[in-house]
Amino acid sequence: MQEDFRLIVDLVTVLAAAAVGGLLAAGLRLPVILGYLVGGIVVGPTGLGLIRELIQVETLAQFGVAFLLFALGVEFSLAQLRKVQAIALGGGGLQILLTIAITAALSLGVGWVSSPTQGVFLGAILSLSSTAVVLRSLMDNNQVESPQGQVTLGMLIVQDLALGIMLAVLPALEHPESVGWAVVRALATTSLFAGVAIAAGLWCIPPLLRWVAATESRELFLLTVIVLCLGIALVTEQLGLSIEMGAFVAGLMISEVEYADQTLTYVEPLRDVFATLFFASVGMLIDPVFIWQNLELILGLVAIAMVGKALIVIPLVSAFRYPAPVALFAGLGLAQIGEFSFVLASEGQKLGLISRPVYTLVLGSTAMTLMITPFLLQLSPKILHLLGMVPWLAPWVHRLDTPQEQWGCDEQRDHIIVAGYGRVGQNIVNLLLQRGYPVLVIEQSEAKVQLLRNRHIPYLYGNCASPYVLEKALVAQARSLVIVTNEASSSRLCVQRARELAPKLDIVARACKDADIDLLYQLGAKEVVHPEFEASLELSTHVLLCLGESSATVQAEILQVRQGRYADFRPELTCPLPLPEAPQWANTSP
């Protein structure tokens, strides 16, 4: 078979295996990333051995990481990056240094390595986490813009930046006297690149995209965007930095231009295809036989690495005054060993910093952590609830249960409480204020609280699910409570506890998932709104009116759908169901 055609066959084989694995994982209600990884294992060299052009496939798979980080840069924007710069730079930098220091001391103490240099190198490997896996998990759960998503991604971006510095310093580890100069040179290169990128983002990229958009050619626009993304990524690679950092910076450069949304729309299909290829290629590196033969040792290493990193990250994030859910999510999200530790470990093996057996164990441990991470992120709310039941951990879990800051809430009477000041919450507050209604906002994001301070809107800085915060918000004297947080568990607890404090209060809540609709009604909400279903209703209303249906008939049908709890839009319901039993955690007080 011709070599070029063989590559096409291999690509189709890998994507087909990933698709089958993803379908099986989705059918079993498991993270689809796990399916992609398993698909790669099956067709890879340690599985059926169907892939011949392994190196070429892995090279193409790097496009997946580049497009993932590029799309993240477009969505993240410089404004959002500035909101988490303190925890990203301070917390992210400290996490890397502490991981390296603790790992070096521990590995020397137990005899895993024979020199401090090797210990530092092993710590550098363990300090990196997987931006690709965490980002994909956040996207699957619609949490990219949540506080925990922003904090976790900010720290991951710092790790990606640190990877370039680590690769630059790596050759100097054999000569400790030259390490300082290597660090200075790497930082200077990074600063120079950042300065050029900022200048290009301000003066070069916007006119270029406007010129290309003026041609009204989708193909030219997409081609230009791809060249920008991959071109800047290759430049950073040549500078000794990481490809993913270059792609992320390219996305940031476009995020401030009016064509950012259009760019994201064009790139997303490519991102999803190549990201799937990337996860499958990671699976091809996993040797299940080796893992099974060394299962006890690898499980021990995985437990030490994940628990150790979580115990480093969680206190760090808490020290920056983030609530327990954010700290726990960041700790679980950064607990794994990143796929780019492969790159660092491979370079270290060439330089003799680690032996072949240690390198193989690192690969196996990394693979295990990558497969475990999606489960941990999904289970983070339940883990947090279990931690809250431990007496000596309960004060930390409920640290923001009492208001941390407040302004203008003592004078409120007959007011409307809005829990959450995201995009939807801001629109609701603006509408109410325009009509002269008194408003009080409950928010636990420092960046959003700053917006409230600037606008002199009454607010409480705290957790809306806390009965103490609700009492301070004078919920018993309020006219309505509008819950628009992105946290499903916080929304449910907020409804339940507000109903306990004010049995007759009018509560309207946004459902984050289909399953929450019935549960929120059962807990006491008078109206539950599902954003996607409401969009369907509004679009359907417009179409039916244009088709000549009477306004009264259309409105009656829309009202019937809402009263039926969107049953017509929920295929799992063949008829309206009775309200479900409240889960056990719903009746648990902090």
Image (cartoon, helix red, strand yellow):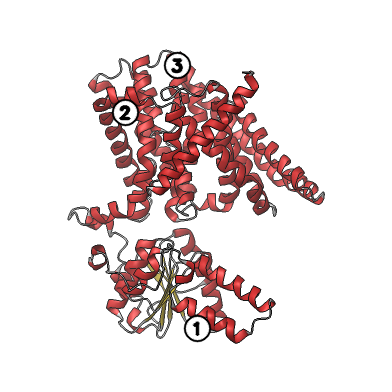
Q: Quadrant of the C terminus?
A: bottom left
**Residue at numbered disc 3:** 177
Compared with residue 280, is residue 486 higher up or lower down, i.e. above or below?
Answer: below
User: Residue 432: x percent and y percent?
Assistant: 52, 79
Compared with residue 141, is residue 444 higher up or lower down, i.e. above or below?
Answer: below
Q: CA distance from mark 3 to mark 2?
A: 22 Å
User: Residue 184: x percent and y percent?
Assistant: 53, 26
Q: CA distance from mark 1 to mark 3?
A: 67 Å
Q: Disc 2 residue type?
A: Thr
User: Residue 550: x percent and y percent?
Assistant: 64, 85
Q: Is residue 331 visible?
A: no
Mark seen at residue 103: 2
Q: Residue sitting at 54 percent across and 53 percent down?
A: 80
Q: CA distance from mark 1 to mark 2?
A: 56 Å
Task: Name which quarter of the figure residue 45 lies in.
Answer: top left
User: Residue 95: x percent and y percent?
Assistant: 38, 38
Compared with residue 222, is residue 519 higher up or lower down, i.e. above or below?
Answer: below
Q: Secondary structure at mark 1?
A: loop
Q: Quadrant of the N terminus?
A: top right
For disc 1, the neighbor class at 10 Å (few under 14, some 14 to 19, many from 20) is few
In front here: 369 or 576?
Answer: 576
Q: Residue sitting at 46 percent across and 48 percent down?
A: 86
**Residue at numbered disc 1:** 437
Task: For the residues labelled 3 and 2, say whether their Cβ atoms are less than 8 Å apart.
Answer: no
Q: Residue sitting at 58 percent across and 23 percent down?
A: 56
Q: Disc 1 residue type?
A: Tyr
Task: For the residues labelled 1 and 3, say whether their Cβ atoms are less than 8 Å apart.
Answer: no
